[in-house]
Amino acid sequence: MGTNNVVFLEVIGWFDESGKELVHRIPEQGSGEIKWGAQMTVRESQAAVFFYNGRACDAFGPGRHTLKTANIPLLTKVLSLPWGMTSPLRAEVYFTNMKVFPNLTWGTRDPVAFRDRELGLIRLRAFGVFNLRIIQPVLFINSLVGTQGVFTTEAISEYLNRVIVSRFNDFMGEKIDTIFDLPAKYNELSGELKKVLQTDFTQFGLGLADLYINSITPPPEVQKAIDDKSRLGVFDDLNKLLKMKAAMALEAASQSQGEAGAGLGMGMGFMMPAMFAETFRGGSTPTAPVESVSCPGCGQPVQREAKFCPKCGQQILIFQKCAGCGENLPANAKFCVQCGRSVEQKPQQKKCPHCGAANLPNSIYCNQCGEKTVK
């Protein structure tokens, strides 16, 4: 049933056909007159936030729920005559997609300045992917979605890309001295960069499920200098050159049709049964773990459906966070209970003292010139 009928009660549900919608509002056109007793069905991969009279009342997990409003079929229409047969008791449901959104790309639009220990000041390009998910539906809607009817990954990917690039620039300046050390540290850098970005994502109710660095590349002229240096490093040692030639000769022999090739093929044939035995070796099927989120107070894992942390009593469902100190704010708060900051006051950007470029408030290195933004 629709949400604008006069007699019948509503049956509310939502399916994401595109696979890219983070939030979808019911009704899709503005707010509606959802009646007392309306039935709402929430799937396992969803959470629903019910807004009534302009306020977020509660967040609902998977299952069928009965909504309670003051809109009564027929009677509400009669009583709303002074308002042009439109009930002033407005209600809407925001469905949030709690699944993991994979393969979102990030990368540097312009080369990032980096001071290399051996090559001096160079510019690097970095690219990768990250997986995103919603962990606090109410906080996400209040801080980013607002009153939009549909909110997709395209609406937020550009901003998140800039945040990742800014933190990546600071991270490179602190952890890496030269780009010659990069190939062996991609996994380590990805894991540590993910921890740095958690605060930037959780302030909007988002969680960074995974982050991967696919490539960090210098300009073509720097790549040519690196190739020249690697060639000199090989040919300076004659012993290394001879070993390389021997390995190439062995590879060519294994591909030939003669006795040597046949012998190598027979050796691979003896190895195949062991490889298949290892592949088909039986084992117990692991049990899927119970999905949980981290408590914003003590950091202990808590089940997603829980309202309060069983360890410290902290409220799990966050409506808003202070932009100054990060304190959790109650619903409809105008000032922070911890630092007194106005909730509507926005954090200011930090300007680089060298080139004047705008950076995130906690940035250490400038995205434009690579110099430190703090003394």
Image (cartoon, rainbow, N blue to C red):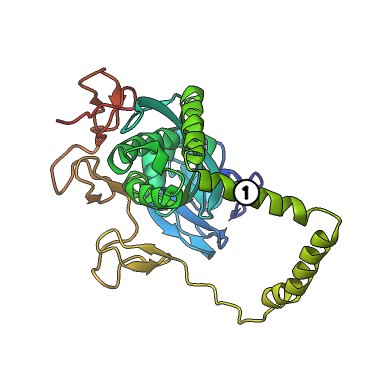
In the image: residue 266, left or right of residue 248: right
Is disc 1 placed on a helix, strand or loop?
Answer: loop
Q: Which residue is mark 1?
A: 16
In the image: residue 235, left or right of residue 300: right
**Residue ranking furthest to the top:** 355
**Residue ranking furthest to the right:** 257
- Above or below: residue 224 compared with residue 201: above
Pick whichever, 260 or 78, lies toward us: 260
Pick whichever, 206 or 343, lies toward us: 206
Figure quadrant of the C terminus: top left
- Above or below: residue 332 compared with residue 42: above
Q: Quadrant of residue 340?
A: top left
Q: Position of residue 172 (x, y in %)?
A: 34, 39
**Residue 84 appearing in the image:** no
- Above or below: residue 309 compared with residue 224: below
- Residue at left 58%, top 47%? 242
Pick whichever, 310 or 243, lies toward us: 243
- Residue at left 36%, top 28%? 119
In the image: residue 50, left or right of residue 359: right
Q: Position of residue 292 (x, y in %)?
A: 42, 66
Q: Position of residue 21 (x, y in %)?
A: 56, 44
Name the kind of residue labelled 1 in the image: Asp
- Residue at left 49%, top 36%? 230
**Residue 183 appearing in the image:** yes
Q: Position of residue 199 (x, y in %)?
A: 31, 48
